[in-house]
Amino acid sequence: MSFASHDRPGCFGNSFRSIAVAALVTAVGMVTTAQAKLWSPQVLSNGAVNIVKYNAATTPSTLDMQTVVGVALPAAGFFVSGMEFTPDGRLWTLMQGTPGSMMQGLYTINFVTGAATQVGPPLGLAPNEILTDLTWNPKTHRMSAMATTSSGGLTSRILDLDINTGAVTNARTVNSTVNVLHVAMTADPNGSYFFVDIFNNWLSELNGGDAMWLGSLFGFNANLNCGLGTEFQGANAGRIWMTAYNQNLNTPSQSRSGLYQVDPNSGSPGFWVTLPGGSSTIYSDVTVQPVVNSCPADFTLDSEVADSDFVVFAGQYEALDCASASMPAGCSADLNFDGLVDDTDFVLFAGAYETLICP
Ligand SMILES: [Ca+2]
Ligand SMILES: [Ca+2]
């Protein structure tokens, strides 16, 4: 068994082809629904991995499985340990394998064919580190990966990734007062990080540089494969989903994977539904599919992209980095979701400005 990790891809140049890209981005954007559309990596006992899409009903116990696609893994022994959307609807996965292996990392994935393409090796990964989970941080507009040694310890690391190159743009150490093994991570709408540790079965939140205990997660034997995913949009923004495997040591046939909803205040997991596939099927992560904004360059929300939007753009362009303290809230002008407001975004903005009226 193992965990998960990731890195990410990107695909932007900075010239004229962006007019076409602008049209694409304009067609993509964000909104919300009560019924969460969830995606998970499904790990089978023979090592095969699928990505699956399912609808979690507004009340527990029902599940609408919609799509199952086989994933082309980079090598035997690898699996998808993390999965996350960027707000423009692109799906990213984190491959985990041999500790230190540079085949671990961020991949783009085609959810029609299952083809997975590595964005780039996770630079700076220590020889004994694995990447156990991937999360979108809506504050920094970066994908973040959890890096830990496979034996856990008093520290782990959060790596912020450039989705265009897979390069680590920022690495920070997470300190714990006892030995932990962080197998799951998510960020809430404010950009705060939450972790699941399987040595102690608890949920913690990053505070300064420390993982602070929030509550105990499980009433059963947790195991290595676990995932967290946050809803960032709509009435349920901030809701945290979790996939976890309940291993029944006494009656293995009764082991099962389940979908839970985690209370970020208490750490309490609310059981939602059993996930299909039987007692040996593991769901290593969960992510919520975003509703894409059809007019992302309309920062002022008046249904057109005009001079007032340019003023907003210019202010964010000046600040450049979504993670900087001077960046206006939301970093809305990062139209390609790569953590920066730069010339690439300006080309996208210019295309929308020229169109003026939102679709
Ligand atoms: Ca506007
Ligand atoms: Ca950008």
Image (cartoon, helix red, strand yellow):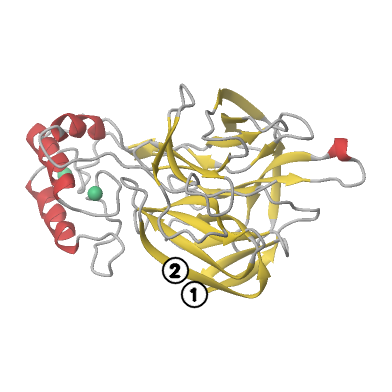
Q: Is residue 61 above or below residue 341?
A: above
Give x and y (percent) for residue 287: 52, 42
The residue where tag 1 is placed is 209
Q: Amino acid at mark 2?
A: Arg
Reading the image, the residue beneath label 2 is 172
The residue closer to the viewer here, 331 or 83, is 83
Note whether residue 252 is visible: yes
Binning the other alpha carbons within 10 Å of mark 2 as few (below 14), some (14 to 19) or many (20 upward) gives few
The tag on residue 337 is none
Asked if residue 87 is positioned above or below residue 176 in the image, the reply reads above
Q: Identify the residue at image location x=60%, y=66%.
A: 204
Residue 169 in the image: state x and y as whole percent.
34, 60
Which secondary structure, mark 1?
loop
Q: Earlier in the sequence, mark 2 or mark 1?
A: 2
**Label 2 lies in ligand 2 vicinity (Cβ under 8 Å):** no
Answer left or right for 327 relative to 90: left
Q: Is residue 136 left or right of residue 52?
A: left
The amino acid marked with disc number 1 is Gly
Residue at 23 percent of width and 68 percent of height:
326
Image x and y of residue 190, in percent: 42, 60
Q: Secondary structure at mark 2?
A: strand
Q: Nearer the viewer, mark 2 or mark 1?
A: 2
Badge 1: how crowded within 10 Å, few (<14), some, or many (20+)? Answer: few
| Residue at (29, 49) in percent of width and height | 338
Q: Contact (CB < 8 A) between labels 2 and 1?
A: yes
